[in-house]
């Protein structure tokens, strides 16, 4: 569940922020994904909430990040057990 449903529940706790869901481009290439997202983000600096992709976006485009909020993210590969759960 990596869409607006998971983050929508957080809106109560983040009432100082406007939550805007960015649809993740259909690609397995992180370079392509973050480049597409960067082209779609028109603001100069953003507060970014997410996991793997948000982390990579912040590394590749640090000048676009005001604050980074990481959720359900780890720098390691997803375990085979967890991959089966999402398949």
Image: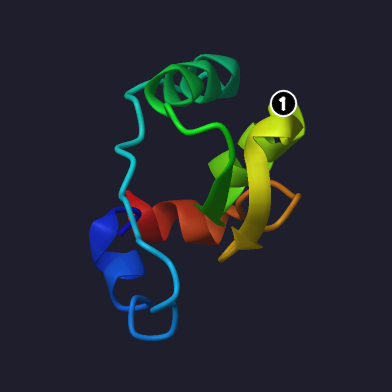
- In the rendered image of this protein, does residue 14 appear above or below residue 62? below
- In the rendered image of this protein, does residue 49 appear above or below residue 35? below
Q: Secondary structure at mark 1?
A: helix
Name the residue that disc number 1 marks.
Answer: 60
Q: Residue at x 29, y 53 (%)?
A: 3
Indicate the colouring scheme.
rainbow
Residue sitting farthest toward the bottom: 13
- In the rendered image of this protein, does residue 74 appear above or below residue 35? below
Residue 50 seen in the current view? no
Q: Residue at x 69, y 28 (%)?
A: 61
Residue 66 horizontal side relative to residue 16, left or right = right
Residue 79, image quadrant: bottom right
Residue 5 horizontal side relative to residue 62, left or right = left
In the rendered image, the quadrant that contains the N terminus is bottom left
Residue 30 horizontal side relative to residue 19, left or right = right
Residue 38 horizontal side relative to residue 25, left or right = right
Residue 51 seen in the current view? yes
Residue 11, image quadrant: bottom left
Q: Residue at x 44, y 75 (%)?
A: 16
Q: Residues within 10 Å of mark 1 (few under 14, many from 20)?
A: some
Q: Position of residue 74 (x, y in %)?
A: 70, 57
Task: Please give the count of numbered marks on the rendered protein.
Answer: 1
Residue sitting farthest toward the left: 5
Q: Position of residue 85 (x, y in %)?
A: 38, 61
Q: Residue at x 52, y 60 (%)?
A: 81
Nearest the camera: 19 or 72?
19
Q: Position of residue 19 (x, y in %)?
A: 35, 60
- In the rendered image of this protein, does residue 60 appear above or below residue 69? above
């Amino acid at each position: 569940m990596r869409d607006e449903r998971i983050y929508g529940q957080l809106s109560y706790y983040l009432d100082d922020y406007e939550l805007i869901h960015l649809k993740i481009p259909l690609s397995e290439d992180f370079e392509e994904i973050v480049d597409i997202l960067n082209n779609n983000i028109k603001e100069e600096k953003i507060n970014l909430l997410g996991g793997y992709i948000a982390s990579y976006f912040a590394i590749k485009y640090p000048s676009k990040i005001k604050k980074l909020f990481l959720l359900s993210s780890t720098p390691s590969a997803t375990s085979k057990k967890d991959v089966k759960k999402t398949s």
